[in-house]
Amino acid sequence: MLEFQKQILTTLVEDDSLLIMAPGLGLFKLFCSFLELYCNNDNHLVFVLNTSPALDKVIQERLLSQGIPQAKALQSIEYDTPSDTRTTMYRQGGVFSVTSRILAVDLLLKRVPTALVSGIVVYNAHRVRANSMEELILQIYREENEEGFIKAFSDQPHAFTTGFAPLQNKLKTLQLRSVQLWPRFQVMVSNDLTHDNEEVIELRQPMTEDMEKIQQGLIECMEATLAEVRKSNQRVNVPEYTFENSLFKSFDAIVRQQLDPIWHQVPASTKQLVGDLKVLRQLLAYLTTYDCVSFNSFIETIITSNTPAPNSLMKRQSQWLFLDAADRLITSSRKRVFVQPSDKEYQSTPEMAFNRTLVGDLPNNIKLVLEEQPKWKLLQDILDEIEEDVTTNTIHGAPVLVMVNDQRNCAQLQEYISRKQALPQKLAGRYFKWRRDMQQIQGATQSQASTTQQQQQRQEQITPQRYVPNKRRRVRGGSATASSPSSRPPPSSASSTVHSNMIETAKRLGEDNNDDLDDFGVGDDDFEVDSIIATMELGEHDILPTFEEVTAGSIVTIQCYENDVNEQVLEDYQPRYIIMYDPNPAFIRRVEVYRAMNPSLQVRVYFMVYDNSVEEQKYLSLIRKEKEAFEKLIREKSIMAIPIQQQRQSEKEEMLIRKVSSRYGGGELKLATTQTVIVDMREFRSSLPPILYSKGVKIIPCTLLVGDYILAPDVCVERKSISDLIQSLNSGRLYSQCESMKTHYKIPILLIEFDENKSFSLQSVADMKENIVATDLSSKITLLTLAFPMLRIIWSSSPQETTTIFKQIKEAHDEPIAEEAVLIGADNPDQVNTTINVTPEDILRSMPGVTSKNYWLIMNKVNNLESLAKMKEKAIQEIIGIGPGKLLYRFLHRTIRT
């Protein structure tokens, strides 16, 4: 460890605090070193929160490499771990990684010996939100155990700078009073990482002429779109709407955060502009990341998505496509792939020799260009230089590490290094095949639309008009189409469909005409598509006749930037040469730490960046924003009010203040009992249980068959968020839930809960129709109230408001009994089984043919979902009946067509 890392670890052991470090300074290593202290001791019970299963495996591997026995290393508790097993594990002690939902339930049900817990470690503390499960866990833990420690780790300083007093509020949420700030410019850090023998070669690669035109066009389109957003929204924070901020993914969250409270009043044009900003930002990133063929295909996909289908309602198109800058970038994007006779460069472009097998049939009168990414050639030159350096200096054991942004880039670079010319031609072959398929689909669609139009015209000539024409006077901005009554849903905007279309395009370009070609997946987080690691095609020269050890000096490794894995990558490979294909500030610091810990390796770093590009500007902006974030945190730390450990007032004192008045007699009256709410296990995904607990309500987790919240022996509440309400109404599940509540409870209540950060509006003004339509959300709710006259509906603007309403309702009713609530809805007491896993049960209950009355029959007779999927139709029908069994069997064995 370096000196500053030792100092951080020493301070962490001594005091409870929140550690905020600059990215890349070794947070993951410090985190594992801290856990190692408690893995070596037998008499400790430590919980780790906010880690993923993949990260748990990396932590376990690191602890094992440090000599920690398997039995004492980090243990993961998953959702399928039975409650009895969890209780036994807690009693035995150890270091456990557990999900917040499971630990919160176990704490409330007293399965965890809270007094014996040594401490709780919170990783990724920037993700802990107010009224979250983590806050509930820490609150219960600190109330029942004042001696144990709480440690929090984070390397995202910018996440603590938004909102009012963000650092102070975060410390209050984490039940902490102190914070450690370790930026890169801290004196001790700077002294440890600064060395005279640093060998860094910065390579500023110029972009091609067409790439510069595309970049300039995208910048002009983004600035024009930002200007329109600022002009159309006077109630938003205009200084945030800058081009520099729009380069980052966080800009999308900033825009939605400001517009969500008035989203129902935001016109469709503004929503379209917000979506266009995201698309343009992605295109700017793709310009320097993807090859010319893939980038041009994305441009064509956007154009296709904005082209209305024949005889369809005219949808709103992206306005930036009508700018002159958009025309220039579209033309330049195509010219990077091929030129056609109408281009002035056509005559001067030489005929390109290509492999007909890879490219396939080309359209007539075009010439292939297939402009390579400038960094590809630069990377090959660097590798040649390294090879020459190794040969000249006879260096032994000099592995090379190449770092890129995503898996798609990783796969393409592997392909380019091994085959060079084959990669662009292969991509071109897939591209032209994709274009031919698109033209066939469009031709078939237009033919079908033409036939449908002729049929409609004949029908209109025969059938008279059956509706009353709209006689309302048209106002400015209105149109005949907009004012006419229609039951059809409004057409979706172009930006709402462009993402899915671009995903499909990337998948098509990743498909191969032959089985022996490799597949490039989509590797971008914006599309939320899982990255696919390309499998390389092996030639005869790649296969050795015998098994031999590959020496470290002959390895060229291409890896992606992964926050918590990069430190392990550097330690595992011990690279002598590091090539940063894409700039990344966090990894630069990891290299600095790696150099400081291995001064004898003489590491050479190649830093590649496009000159005068958005890539360079984004990199510099990241560094500046991080510095500004730490400056804000240092300033807030110096002036903030240190949170005091709040000890919740006892319920007896609280009830005395609330219920007893000194102006009247009766001071010796018997006080009311503690307010209790029985909560279904599945509701611990929401923020309502933590808020109820913070307001002094005792919550009891149970697996309820009827309802989500039991407020009293005769009061049952079914909670629905807006998205859940729409889904339940469409599937008919809400009807059966209301029927069950009406059968078993005197007062059934439907709680419709809104998000506190969004508008308190069920439907936007644009979605309201002049005529009553049975498919509307409001119409379905009306039909539900007519079917269940005793059903009460609560409209709550936020979970905090829901808590207030619950407390008011409970004042007039007795407290519920958990033992009775879990039995309601069961045909016999044997159905109640608290060891059933909640997640598989939710999946089972969502299947067709499975109802609230027969799902227990399946759970008692079938071991798991896999066994259910393998059962015969007759066997399923014997359990739940002929009709439901047939529905369930068809659902399980239905063929999915793609």
Image (cartoon, rainbow, N blue to C red):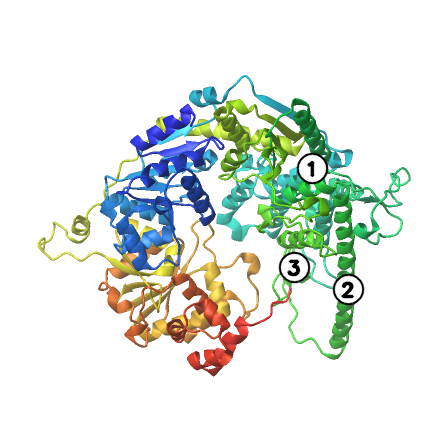
Q: Amino acid at mark 3?
A: Arg
Q: Is residue 773 above or below residue 118?
A: below
- Mark closer to the observer (3, 1): 1
Name the secondary structure under disc 1: helix
Query: Under tag 2, what secondary structure?
Result: helix
Mark 2 neighbour class, 10 Å CA radius: few under 14, some 14 to 19, many 20 or more: some
Q: Residue at x 70, y 39 (%)?
A: 417
Q: Residue 474, which numbered label?
A: 3
Which residue is denoted by mark 2 in the rendering? 446
Location of the N terminus by quadrant is top left
Q: CA distance from mark 2 to mark 3?
A: 33 Å
Q: Which mark is residue 800?
A: none
Count of numbered tags: 3
Q: Vertical placement of 396 versus 111: above or below?
A: above
Residue 402 drawn at (x, y percent): 62, 35
The residue that appears at 76% across and 44% down in the rendered structure is 424
Kindly identify which residue carries mark 1. 220
Residue 491 in view, yes or no? yes
Question: What residue is drawn where x is 53% and y is 67%?
Answer: 776
> Disc 1, disc 2: CB below 8 Å?
no
Q: Give me the C-alpha separation between circle 1 and circle 2.
A: 34 Å
- Please tell me in which quadrant of the rendered image residue 739 appears: bottom left
Q: Earlier in the sequence, mark 3 or mark 1?
A: 1
